[in-house]
Amino acid sequence: MRISSLFFCRNGRIYIYDGVGGRLRSDLNVNAPVLDASFDEDGKIFSAALGGNVMSHILAPDGSIKSDLIGAHDQAARCLEITRDPKIIATGGWDETLCGWSPDSSTSSPRKPLFSVKVPGRVFAMSPLGGTKVLVGTSNRQILLFDVRNPSQPELQRESLLKNQLRCIVGLPDGSGFTAASTEGRVAIEKLDGVGSYTFKCHRVGNRIYPVNAISFHPHWHTFATGGADGSVSVWDGNAKKRIRHYPRYVKRFSSPPNFFSTSSRSVHETAYHFGGGCSVRQV
């Protein structure tokens, strides 16, 4: 089955929508607040939960779901990403570790990770960069870049240009760097070589400053959208350093992690309206 989007919620439920008209196909209960979830090209779903469990879920044609426990963190499993080559489920936890797991479902008990690396702080944000690398943002504003083929040491480690707590991080489409957002209503465009990096203010109304909770790039034009706790969405041209479009404040704040919302205002607003109270969305 082709999945178009997942909605994962703090009440422990994951809602699965198919690629034919975006119909709700099924839902499942992980029995713990779901902090992140994703799916692969075969339609297999992976989830990371507050209790630390990392699970896989397979949806059968009849709508039934088979779930397997593929691993666990000692504390909350906050972030989950799927690398392409090799295919690894990468998770970051509040136990200050980055772990890699095999996507195969062969046991109902936690298995040992393919790798487990200590990082300097709780993992607050993650993003893939290319097919083999993953960016990690931690609670003390450290940004690390790991290659999952050789994860023993990070290829890059630096302090973020942002001076407040990180909310999300997203790799640039050309692989030259990343964007990061913070609770201070500010976004950073950071290049791996450090050349041309800058920050800018956004999602501020008068003297009120709102966290920037989400960043999503257009797949072709490489413009990007930011969603904030002020309930608004702005679209930016990072090369020209200018805002292209501002969508007015909506009734709910945006809480989706990076790469989780469409740059279509209709999709963003519908997501906020239906799932703004404790749910996030992962889309193709």
Image (cartoon, helix red, strand yellow):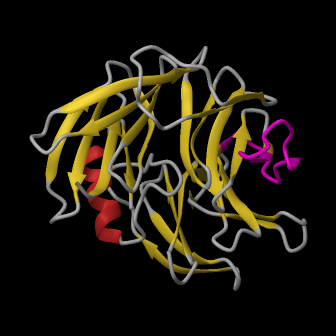
In the depicted structure, whether residue 215 falls above or below residue 26: below
Q: Nearer the viewer, residue 212 or 97?
A: 97
Q: How many marks?
A: 0
Residue 150 in the magenta stretch? The answer is yes
On the rendered structure, is 234 left or right of 55?
Answer: right
Residue farthest to the left, as pictured: 62
The C terminus sits in image quarter: bottom left
Q: Which residues are magenta?
A: 144-166
- What is the x, y in percent for residue 149? 74, 46
The N terminus sits in image quarter: bottom left
Q: Nearer the viewer, residue 239 or 87?
A: 87
Indicate the quadrant where residue 153 lies.
Answer: top right
- What is the x, y in percent for residue 254? 43, 51
In the depicted structure, whether residue 156 falls above or below residue 122: below
In the depicted structure, whether residue 132 falls above or below residue 277: below
Question: What's the magenta bit mostly, secondary-structure-wise?
Answer: loop
